Amino acid sequence: MGLDIRWPIGLMFSLIGVLLVIEGARLGPSAKALNINIDLIWGVVLVIFGGLMLFGAIRGNKKP
Amino acid sequence: MQPIHLAWIDYTVLLTYVAFVIGIGWTLARYMKSSADFLTSARSIPTWVTGLAFISANLGALELVGMAASGAKYGIATSHFYWVGAIPAMVFLAVFMMPFYYGSKARSVPEYLQMRFDERVMTLNAIAFAVMTLFASGISMNALAKLLNLLLGWDYNFALIICSGVVLVYVLKGGLTSAIYTEVLQFFMIVLGFAPVVYLGLKDAGGWHAITQSLQTVAADPSALQLKPPGEVYQPNAWTGAWKPLLGGADSNPMGVDWFAMVFGLGFVLSFGYWCTNFLVVQRAMAAKNMTAARNTPIVAAIPKMFFPILVILPGMIAIALAVTPGKNYRLPPPPIDSDRFAAAAQILANAPGKDMDATYAQVSAAIGMKMDRAKVEAIVKSETVSSLASVISQDEEAKSAVQSSKAAFHQARRGGKASSSEIAEAKNKASDAEKALAAADKKFEDTSGDLNSQLRDAVLVNDYDGVIFSLVKRYCPPGLLGLALTGLLASFMSGMAGNVTAFNTVWTYNLYQSARRRFVDVPRPAALDYKGGKGENVVLTPHEPADVHFLWMGKFITVVGILLSIACAYFAKQYNNAMDIIQLVFGFVNAPLFATFLLGMFWKRTTATGAFYGLFGGIAGSAVFHALTIAEGNTPGLKGGYIHVVQEFPSEMAQNFWLASFAFTACFVLTFVISIMTKRTKSDEQLKGLVYSLTPKIVDRDVPVWQRPAVVGIALLIICVILNIIFW
């Protein structure tokens, strides 16, 4: 209805993903997270997810 | 638990989410031109969106918190709420019921009842639903405000009002579409926010195999976690088997349920009652853009639903496993201590050093009101925190009185008029010094009492299962991920409120308000061509009613009222603990009989309106009576049942709920059947076309690719469900 929902989903998760990547790069692996740099890894996953959504939104729906 | 300290990034994630949901509402506002746009999305939403919204509307406070709690309490058997208690019903809804809901062009579930039966049945359902949905909304928001208070230290009232305010803004602006879109956003937030926590938990606990070992240890000695009195045990696979513990009978599994109650009570009655008739979820399917999309909506929703146990139930099991594994430094979270009780306990402890330990232990336990670990209480009494407690308290009080007297001296000096300016300045300095000293003493007091609170909570031997998911988030999440997980939790609660309010405002506006207007207020006039009513309307043709814009206004107005009433319900819900059991009980009262009505209405053309009405009424009344005559082991008669007389005792509340549902369904079914046979039909076959199975042409999915046919995918999902049940037998 007027707004393709993939736009806000894509934008929001890309944004949050970038924030997590920055934080992960800044802090390094966390002792809490069993010494895994979970922020960095998961941040990248979110950016990819957001990107996929945005890609879908830009292409739009083929069917009428 | 000390309040979690959030870093800037966590707040940023939270604010980003809030900005986006409000932005979505704002963007959609310009498309809200009619009441249909605002209340029903005017049938415009694509399948994947309605499908995810369908499952997401269900994924509120209940699921995340409650399922983790149940996963801790009952283990993998909790999955029955999904594999037995949801998937079959969702498939049934898609294949057999959506054609009637969507094809009849009813704008809501009660409206279908109006078309099929009459206004009485519709009104009974509409009122019952409206009340239930507001309570569900309140329970969501109460849980949210408690969470924010416990985890972040926010004031309960502040948190409740602010979060309700955010929901109000985006629902008021963008209507149902806004709620649906934000539900999809929230779905991804939850999955992406919690997947890392589950992964870390699994890794920490040593993997699935190690978890099952730990759980078997617990089953052999449940008293270690205060689950049963010492000496009693559960079957070894009580947490790790879904069916075997049930087959062992009600006493050998933590749920206290036998297989029949599970399959019939939950699997059939409660499950179908919820998924097939609850307008909260059905509304999302009704917003789909065409019939195929509508029928596929529950199917699309069923796919993630089937795999959710990994995300929501597993954390509970991980928590139990961690709690019994030495070296992990984890215990199941204790409930928070009420501030009055804490003050009383602190007072006792301040005077404790040197006194008799037994007496102190008894006094502290009584003050706290929960069972406490004696060794730990002894350690607290001997600790530095307590030895300094008395002096910290008295220092704080001295500082307070010093401030008072120095301030009084200062004011005196100023007003007296006799003091010199240097004397006044000196008095002022003394006052401000005293204030600084007070601030320092206050801080010391806060730190000390914070420490004491943590120590006391650690000594409590009661488990707060609702706190399990939070404790895991707190344990594993660094800043960043913490913000994401917390925002996911927040999102799920808020969308619980949004979903309930959008269902409420539709039912009110169309089925209570508009119907009442048409019957009592708007003067009917004969034969006109401009009224496009639904099928089988009982109201006389063409009411002279206001233009649609009035109903759009009413929809918005009642949205505000709905939010306010939800807040009132939240305060009410604050009184009760495990939301899960209460919700199941309420749903049982109202939903179990309801499904009997729909079943007979949709599949038997002989069902009459009178039969449906009295059958439904009888079913609901029957539930109340059943509840008044039965009780669960360990509960005292009163709010939990048995307040007239205890005729039957059940091993657990859950068992009582499932049997209540079975009873209510049967009562309604029999009553409806018998009364229908005894009364005349009020609608002809022609009027019932499109509303009853035998009178409606079957939908044949010839032009749709195989993988989009609801029946085909539905069967595939059921097969996967059976396989999952076998794997976790």
Image (cartoon, rainbow, N blue to C red):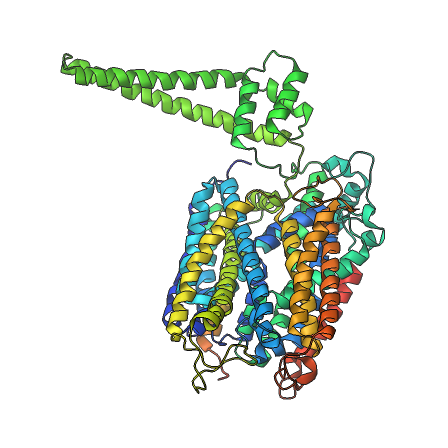
Q: Residue at x 65, y 47 (%)?
A: B69
| In the foreground, B212 or B171 | B171
Residue B420 sits in quarter:
top left
Q: Which quarter of the rendered picture does the C terminus of chain B lie within?
A: bottom right
Horizontally, residue B417 falls left or right of residue A49, namely left
Q: Residue at x 57, y 36 (%)?
A: B336
Q: Position of residue B96 (x, y in %)?
A: 67, 76
| In the foreground, B600 or B79 | B600
Q: Position of residue B640 (x, y in %)?
A: 68, 45
Q: Which quarter of the rendered picture does the N terminus of chain B lie within?
A: top right
Where B647 sits versus B23, above or below?
above
Q: Is residue B440 visible?
A: yes
Where B151 sits versus B118, above or below?
above
Q: Residue at x 47, y 27 (%)?
A: B447
Q: Is residue B86 visible?
A: no
Where B460 sits versus B677, above or below?
above
Horizontally, residue A36 falls left or right of residue B242, namely left
Horizontally, residue A48 falls left or right of residue B225, namely left
Where B649 sits versus B679, above or below?
above
Farthest residue, direction right: B248
